[in-house]
Structure formats: structure tokens, C-alpha cells
Image: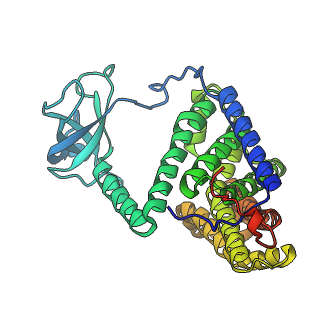
Amino acid sequence: MDHAPEIALSRGVKRGLAIAAAVLAVVTMVGVALLAGTDEPEINARQLGLNSQVFSAEVVSVRLGPCAGTAAADRVPCYAIGFRPEAGPDSGSRLRFEIPKLATSPDLSAGDQIVVSYDRKAEPGFRYQYNDRQRGSVLWWLFALFALAVIALGRWRGLAALVGLGASFAVLLFFVLPALVAGQEPVLVALTGASAIAFLALYVAHGFNFMTTVALLGTLVALVITVLLAMIFVDLAHLTGFTSDEAFVVQVGTSGGISITGLVLAGMVLGALGALDDVTVTQASAVWELRDASPDMSVHALARAGLRIGRDHVASTVNTLALAYAGAALPLLILFVFSRQSLGTIANSEVIATEIIATLVGSIGLVAAVPITTWLAAAVLPRRLTSESLLPDHDF
């Protein structure tokens, strides 16, 4: 696996970086242990219209006609969907359900793969309902193409990046989400989870070396700045988080046990983390390469050269972050255009203001990460290589 140039660091610097990484790792693990969700709140999923029993099925027939209990004269058309579940209590049986003919009705035909929800407490004939199309195979093929592209270009480093990506999702699935559902403080959960993700993603993808440690420290400092800014401006803007049906369902389903405003803050923190990792690794790597190419460059000159690289990177990354948030809210933005409201009115609405604050807070965190990581990397690297200090620094 490729790694940073083996620039010798002083024993004191190595010891300081190792101790800092170890202390932060211990704090993160303690936080995970204390915040890990154990007692989940009681949730009546059926009352909220949620169903955890879903099965894959194949459409065997589609017929358009009057809905059950109506006549043709009533002009209430429905699609009668014949299907065969591939799992569940009626696996292999031919069953049917109806879908009203609406503009939003799915365009199904025989042979289509779908997902149906099952409610055993419902009346016979109404226990199965259309849930969605089956997209699992498409997603798996796309992920395989993505993995192949990453490995083809990055080779072992690309494979390590995929492992780090898997570790990040594991933290989200097995720590962050259970802790949030258990009612733990969302900001603490997000900060602890983001720290754990940073440790796993950075060290797995880039190796256990001191360059990665510098990037990690820059990431965590910028993450704290992002959290503080998010807390301040979410409070000043009086954001409630109730901008979607899902937020109301979460609040009602947990009897107020989860802070929706806290979830907004947590989302901002986790949303900014990926871009922070990118910026800090790039800056640390750039400074390492600059030092390797110019051993006699002073700390200030090295930092200035690294900052010149960072300015270009921040300009493109901030634009990427803003467009990512805008793309997620595109249908809503179109509705605002239809309403012919002024730009100020649109920006003032909570749903848009939330995206704006998330974008700006995350961008400020990115901007802060560049000088922090650059100056830290420049400070720990020696100005001149000496034969008596040539100790490998690519491992702890």
C-alpha cells in the first residue's frame, strides 16, 4: 500500500502525536460505551402506519377495473394486482391487492419485482399492500461497479477505502441510530459517532502513520468548531426540525423521547464529516509531499505553500457541499418557484433555512480545517533531514 514519504520526526513529536491519538481514542470509546443505546422506547409501529414485515414478490397479472365494492358507473377504477410472494407465510401462493388508479400509481406489469408489506392482524384480503418496487439487484450491481472503479484506480488503497466506508456505516447502524432511538443527546451522539468514524475511516484508508494522525487531529478540531457553530445558529434561527412528515412520526412514535432539534444538529455534524476528512487528508498529504521535496523550507514557508493548495481545494469542496444540499431540496425549490415568492421569503422558510445553515456551518468548518491541519503538519515536520534522526514514521 502507498503511504506518505518516510520523513523522520523527532521522538518528542512522535510521542506527542501518539499520546494525543491514544487519548482521543479512549475518550471516543468511553463515549460510545456511555451513549450506546440499550433501552429502546416503546413504539407502536402499526399505529404509526409502519410495518416491519415486508417481502419480495413477483407481479403475475395486472387488470384495470372498478374498485372492490363499487360498480363501473361509480367510476372508481383500481388496478387489481395479482402477485406471488417469494417469502413469508404465503410464500409461493397467488394473491392479489388493489391500487387506486391515480397519477402517482406505480406502472406495474407482469414479471415486475416488487416489495409488499404484510399485516397479519388485518382482515383477510387486506393483509398485503404494495410497498415499493424491488431495487435490491440494481443497487448491488451499482455498488459492484463503484467498488470496481475504486479498486481499479486506488488498488490496495481503494480497497482499504471501501473497508473504511463499511466501518463508517457500521458505526451509523450499530451506534449512532440505536443511541438516537434510545433518546440519548443527539449532539453528543453525533460528535462521538463522527469521532469514531474519523478514526476508522482515516486509519483504515490511509494507514496507521503520523500523517494520518495529523489529519485526524485537524478533522476533530474542525468538527468541534462545526458543532459549536451549528448549536449557536440553530438556536438563533429557532429551527424546530419539524419540516417533514418523518419528523412528526418520530416525535409521536417515541412520545417526545427524541429531540428533533437535536437531530437537525446531528445531521449537520455528520453531513460535514465526509468533506472534513477529505480536506484534512489532502492538506496533511500536501504538506508532507512539500517537505519531502524541499527539506530546507521554513515552517512558515511550508505552511504558506500548503495553504495555497488548500485554498483551491476549499473553493471546490464548498461548492460541492452547497450543490449537494441544493440537489436534495430541488423539488421543494421548484415548488417555491411556482409560488412566485421572493428569494428572501424562500430563504426564510424553515426547510430552506435549515439547508442554508447546514451548508454555511459545514463550509466554515471546512475553511477552518485547512489552516488548522496545514499549520499542525508544518509544525511537526522537521526542517532538515539528518542521518542520526532517520527513524521510520509510517507506523506507530
Q: Is residue 268 above or below residue 249?
A: below
* Residue at x 77%, y 79% (from the top left corner): 305
Residue 260, image quadrant: top right
Residue 172 seen from this side: yes
Please state which of residues 281 and 95 is positioned toward the viewer in this rendering.
281
Please state which of residues 225 and 101 is positioned toward the viewer in this rendering.
225
Please state which of residues 19 and 384 is positioned toward the viewer in this rendering.
384
Residue 243 seen from this side: no
Image spot of residue 192 (x, y percent): 69, 40
Image spot of residue 69 (x, y percent): 23, 33
Residue 138 placement, left or right of 382: left
* Residue at x 40%, y 30% (from the top left corner): 51
How many numbered marks have been drawn onto this rendered protein structure? 0
Please state which of residues 390 and 200 is positioned toward the viewer in this rendering.
390
Image spot of residue 363 (x, y percent): 72, 64
Q: Is residue 106 above or below residue 304?
A: above
* Residue at x 67%, y 42% (from the top left corner): 190
Residue 308 placement, left or right of 212: right
Residue 42 placement, left or right of 23: left
Q: Is residue 282 above or below residue 112?
A: below
Residue 22, image quadrant: top right
Image spot of residue 378 (x, y percent): 80, 68
Q: Is residue 191 above or below residue 339?
A: above
Residue 29, image quadrant: top right
